[in-house]
Amino acid sequence: MQTLIQSTAIGLAGILLTACVTEVVANDLDVQSDPATETIEVASAATPKAEPLGPVTEDMLINPPPSSWLMYRGNHASWGFSALDQIDTYTICDLTMAWSVGMDPGSNQTTPVVHDGRLYIAHPKDVITAHDATTGDLIWQYRHEPTAERWGPGEITRAIAIYDDKIYHAASDARIIALSATSGEVVWDTSVGDPSWITHSSGPIVAGGRVFTGRTCGYKAPARCFIAGHDAQTGEELWRTEVIPKPGEPGDESWAGLPYEERIHGSVWMVGSYDTELDTLYWGTSGPAPSPEVLRGGRKADMLFTNSTLALDPATGAMKWYVQHLPRDNWDIDHTYERILVDAEVRPIADATWKQSADLPTGEQKLLTGIPGKTGIVWTMDRQTGEFYWAKQTIFQNVVTDIDPATNTVSINEDLVAAELEGEPDYVCPSLAGGRDWPAGAYNPSSGAMFMPMMTLCMNVAAGSKDPRYRLNPELALAPNTDKVGRLEAIDVETGETLWVNESDHGVLTVLATAGDLLFAGDSQRRFRAYDQTTGAVLWEKILGGPVTGTPISYAVNGEQYVAVSVGGGGGAINAWTFMSKDRTTRQGGNTLYVFKLPSSETK
């Protein structure tokens, strides 16, 4: 049964809210630093010295300790799940701010990592700081001096990684950097390409002693976007796999003769997943540029390996298999988001899903699932072979008309392909701001539910020159039959059944699921909430200092559980979501990391 829950700008209509949902939280600490200084180590009576840490081992990355948060989505499988349960549906009303710390200005979409009582966070524009995870006291900070002028997407760092005794950062000037986790000093620094057209907006994952990264690439000149593997100890590049094939390579024929120098973009700008049992990397890719195929000679080309899931050998980068989720992308409908890896049965309910294979396996299977792209379509596949099992539509979309379950072949809506420049706009759903976008979903292995934040936005769009990147002229619009912008949906990963939906006037951002049956998520109007995972009801709410655009995490120190999230907003789709929500009460900026915990027993 599907339960529909709708929210309003401040509260939620139709839900009994607890008394803990409207508290305003202020920032209590603002860290200022010398921009001319690369690394600063701080030691005083109030701030701990940089003591050596225990190493993060390969076994810890494979089975992360619940007290730590060692990577972007908490584990290699991209679950966004914390096994901590001290904060639960009964204790949530006691949750209060433990500490906060000011961050550098810029577009703030970051994720902290936590190990051995120390919290590390990436600020905009290549600044990394280390803090005492119980107080926020600054231990060290590192400022990367770019080797070239930054361009827009490079101001964002959505993730960093930790392994052994090092912090790994993908910098805006096309460099991969390893820092000492103890002191912040540079251990190694290596270039991956031309910083004029290659940058990073998301960070690495580490597995098997290798650092794996994807990147954002240029929209005008061939940048040869790629995924790369580097030696974690030395920074030596071990391999790179380009998204766009060269003449004569597999996939070349899918470009219908378009000259290689005109094959542009195909970025891999989010963070991949890794299967420890199958020893396989999974990464998503974006579309081509310019978007309208009328600017590519009208070629009806699938354009591999854009908008695809790539399964790669982590030792060599060789492609094991691929699935293309949207061929002939004319609308900037990226498919770069996290792939969730689960072991579960395949038993889709016909009425709850859209497409199913005629030959479904029985028993527990190794699945790759989630919503990989802006269309909001759930894809569930065999992660060893890429075999299609089932798909489900969530938000309204009209660009994909069919998926052939036998071949994984996607058909697009030909009526939405522009035939000329500056022509009449088409009503296309979703918009290039989502649908789904970079805010990540979560999965609870106990309940088998995944939780997906989405936007119900469409666009009236024509091929043209207004947007210098994709050559689209878009005007955003709401999807049919809704007056809401944000949507949070809980879906059973085995059946495809929608368990509940929570719609919001404002953009809903990255979510965190916990073993305490809570789902933490923020929105573009400064609200940070805890939802009941079973019902979608809001149990707790705090009003923070900016749009809640960071990724929530949870960790524990000395037996006490913490929840952390950064705010501030800035740039890109965030502005679009705020504009469409008609919210004029929220100001972008005010970057801050907030950390919450339950009162200690001695302070109750």
Image (cartoon, grey):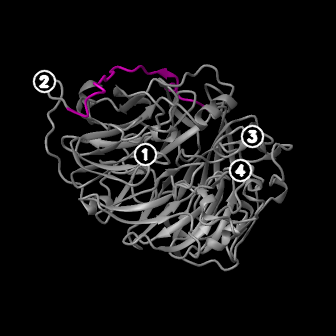
| Residue 388: image location, x then y, percent | 63, 72
- At 69% from the left and 31% from the top, the residue drawn is 580
For mark 4, what is the residue? 331
Dot in front, 4 or 3: 3
- Which stretch did the figure color magenta? 16-40
Residue 522 in the image, given as x and y percentages of width and height = 52, 35
135 or 29: nearer the eye?
29
**Residue 547: x percent and y percent?**
52, 29
The residue lying at 18 percent from left, 40 percent from top is 183
What residue type is disc 3 on? Asn
Kindly report the distance in space between the C-alpha atoms of the residues bearing marks 1 and 4. Answer: 40 Å
Q: Which mark is residue 45?
A: 2
Please report contact status of discs 3 and 1: CB closer than 8 Å, yes or no: no
Q: Earlier in the sequence, mark 3 or mark 1?
A: 3
Give the Cα distance between marks 4 and 3: 10 Å
Task: Find residue 432 and report its image quarter.
Answer: top right
Q: Nearer the viewer, mark 1 or mark 2?
A: 2
Residue position marked by numbered label 3 in the rendering: 473
Disc with the residue nearer the chain's start (2 vs 4):
2
Q: Counting residues from the N terminus, which is met first, the one under dot 1 or under dot 4?
A: 4
Residue 307 showing in the rendered view:
no
Task: Tell which circle, 1 or 2, labels the residue nearer the N-terminal end.
Answer: 2
Kindly identify the amino acid type of the residue bearing the numbered disc 2.
Ala
Mark 2 crowd level (few <14, some 14–19, many ≥20, 10 Å Cα): few
Q: Nearer the viewer, residue 446 or 273?
A: 273
Amino acid at circle 4: Trp
Q: Residues within 10 Å of mark 4 (few under 14, many from 20)?
A: many
Of 300 and 209, nearer the camera is: 300
- Label 1 vs label 2: CA separation? 36 Å
CB within 8 Å, label 3 to label 2: no
Q: Quadrant of the C terminus?
A: top left
State how far apart marks 3 and 1 are (Cα).
45 Å
